[in-house]
Image: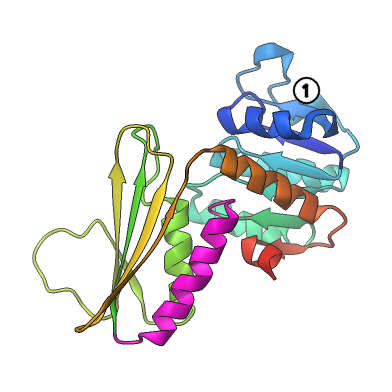
Amino acid sequence: MRAILCGANGAMGKLIDGILADEVVGRVSIDGENGVPRTFSELGKLEADVVIDFSHHTAVPDVLAYAREIGAAAVIGTTGHTPEEKELIFAAAKETPVFFSGNMSLGIAVLCRLAKQAAAAFPDADIEIVEVHHTRKVDAPSGTALMLFNAIKEVRPEAVANCGRAGEGKRTKEEIGISALRLGNVVGIHEVHIHTANQSLVLKHESGSRAMLADGGVAAARFMVGKSAGFYNMESMLN
């Protein structure tokens, strides 16, 4: 596999770079440190199978444009995208192979599947999502929490997200609360609480290291080699 890393000087970029080693044929990082080009224009056109982006969500237009230009797949590992950026990702997938996930962990993909199954098994249960991350995380709720909500919404189309419940008013049956905590150096904890009048079920995933996300990003990149244009995610890999 020939990969190009966007965000190569970031924490995740360095982890992925360490895993792929000689398979990395090009690097881009907005800080320009270590002699790494700041932009794809500076990098120039290279032959590659996949462009892996773990930089910042605002880089999505450039990443997708470059992947299309060189005929490579794009793996988007950033979170916090605006609605416009998400629309751009889905539109690009019509002409380019695009892998996009709010979390690159295989464990989270399994958690999404289990949450969906549990929500279907207990159609009248109250459901709440709790996510915990380090104090440096800038977006809330996390992309993973939204992934969990969207997975549940597949079997509960009437579901409405209530992010950071506050004020007066009873909880409605349609709402799924999403609570975000920012504490110390927590890598990531996600819980789905499912409660009926007589029993409760809690599904939990805890990240032990950010290396887990790097492993997932690399697995996604290898999965995308040779894929035709279309939209792919962790569920695609599970299947």
Q: Nearer the viewer, residue 215 or 73?
A: 215
Q: Mark yes or no: residue 95 visible.
A: yes
Up the image or down, 136 lies above or below 105; here it is above
Q: Is 153 displayed left or right of 163 in the figure? A: right
Q: Main secondary structure of the magenta part?
A: helix
Q: Is 81 displayed left or right of 91 in the figure? A: left
Q: Is residue 73 magenta?
A: no
Q: Nearer the viewer, residue 122 or 81?
A: 122
Q: Residue at x 59, y 33 (%)?
A: 12
Q: Residue at x 25, y 80 (%)?
A: 199
> Which residue in the protein does label 1 denote?
42
Residue 190 in the image: state x and y as whole percent: 39, 55
Up the image or down, 22 lies above or below 200; here it is above
Amino acid type at image mark 1 = Glu
Q: Is 222 displayed left or right of 110 in the figure? A: right
Q: Nearer the viewer, residue 162 or 19?
A: 19
Q: Residue at x 59, y 51 (%)?
A: 104
Give the magenta-colored segment's residue range: 102-124
Residue 196 in the image: state x and y as whole percent: 24, 81
Q: Quadrant of residue 29?
A: top right
Q: Mark yes or no: residue 157 visible.
A: no
Name the image quarter holding the N terminus: top right
Using a 10 Å C-alpha cutoff, classify the residue at mark 1 as few (fewer than 14 neighbours), some (14 to 19) or many (20 or more). few
Q: Quadrant of residue 229?
A: bottom right
SS state under label 1: helix
